[in-house]
Image (cartoon, rainbow, N blue to C red):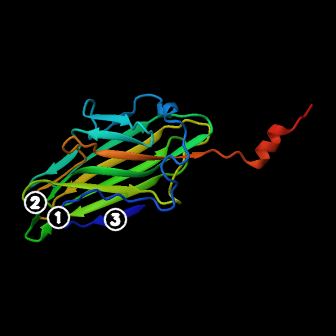
Amino acid sequence: MNTRLRSWCAPLSALAVLLAGAPAAFADAPPPGDVYFSRPPTAAGSGCLPGKWISSLSDEKDAFNVTFFDYFVNIDPGQNFQRKFCDLTVGMHFPQGWSFSITDVTYRGALQLDSVNRQPTSARENSVYSFYGVPGSVTFSSTWVGPIDDFGLPLPYEFTDTLGVNAVIWSPCGQNRDLKIKTDYTVRNNSAKTGHAYASADSIEGQVSTIYHIQWKRCVVSKSRRNARGTDNS
């Protein structure tokens, strides 16, 4: 699990974290016209109720975007915690001979976390990426600790989960397997339950709230398989 404690000192601009050593976007990729959602993405969970989210695939087919309209958690004094989650399933159609993975994910939203008498509230985001029927997954976790606000209002944030070279999980060659993305947000009060906490993955000023960046690679047929295909058994 990749875990990061995020500190705060000012409103964030784009924190574009590049995957070291990764191929340049679309340096080698299938034609964009041959890549599309095999069916509309589906979502289930308290953070992505029907009609409260939308998704789209970029024109270049190097990313797909998800915008949430009601994915937030909020607690007031006297409350302990609140959690919401969203399980997203994405089916991609693309030509035979290619495989894809998610290289990094950019999240946007807002935070407002109190600290009353030096007792801060906190927020946590978890995300898990995997392909259906493929062993293994990649998990990220981010934690914020108050005080965080923008002069008494929620403070916009942007951050990027980047999958290291050894952590990238590829779709199986020759198979269109669904990509599974599970996220959840939790806010917790201080021990005295005297604080207020708010965290969201909602769209900010019309911006897309989550961007999933795609990387492509060609499937490589092993030498033994090529020899087997070329053998004449007659």
* Residue 225, position as x, y percentages in the image: 77, 43
Relative to 11, is 110 above or below? above
* Residue 57, position as x, y percentages in the image: 40, 36
Q: Quadrant of residue 97?
A: top right
Q: Is residue 52 left or right of residue 104?
A: left
Q: Earlier in the sequence, mark 2 or mark 1?
A: 1
Q: Earlier in the sequence, mark 3 or mark 1?
A: 3
Q: Amino acid at mark 1?
A: Gly
The Cα–Cα distance between marks 3 and 1, rounded to whole angstroms, is 15 Å
Secondary-structure class at tag 3: strand
Relative to 42, is 125 above or below? below
Q: Earlier in the sequence, mark 2 or mark 3?
A: 3
Structural crowding at the residue carrying mark 2, measured as other residues with C-alpha within 10 Å and reported as few (<14), some (14–19) or many (≥20) = many
Q: Nearer the viewer, residue 123 or 188?
A: 123
* Mark 2–mark 1 CB contact (< 8 Å): yes
Q: Nearer the viewer, mark 2 or mark 1?
A: 1
Can you tell which mark lies on residue 146? 1
The Cα–Cα distance between marks 2 and 3, rounded to whole angstroms, is 23 Å
Q: Amino acid at mark 2?
A: Gly
Q: Nearer the viewer, mark 2 or mark 3?
A: 3
Q: Nearer the viewer, residue 33 or 166?
A: 33
Instruction: Name the quadrant of the N terminus.
Output: bottom left
Residue at which label 2 appears? 195
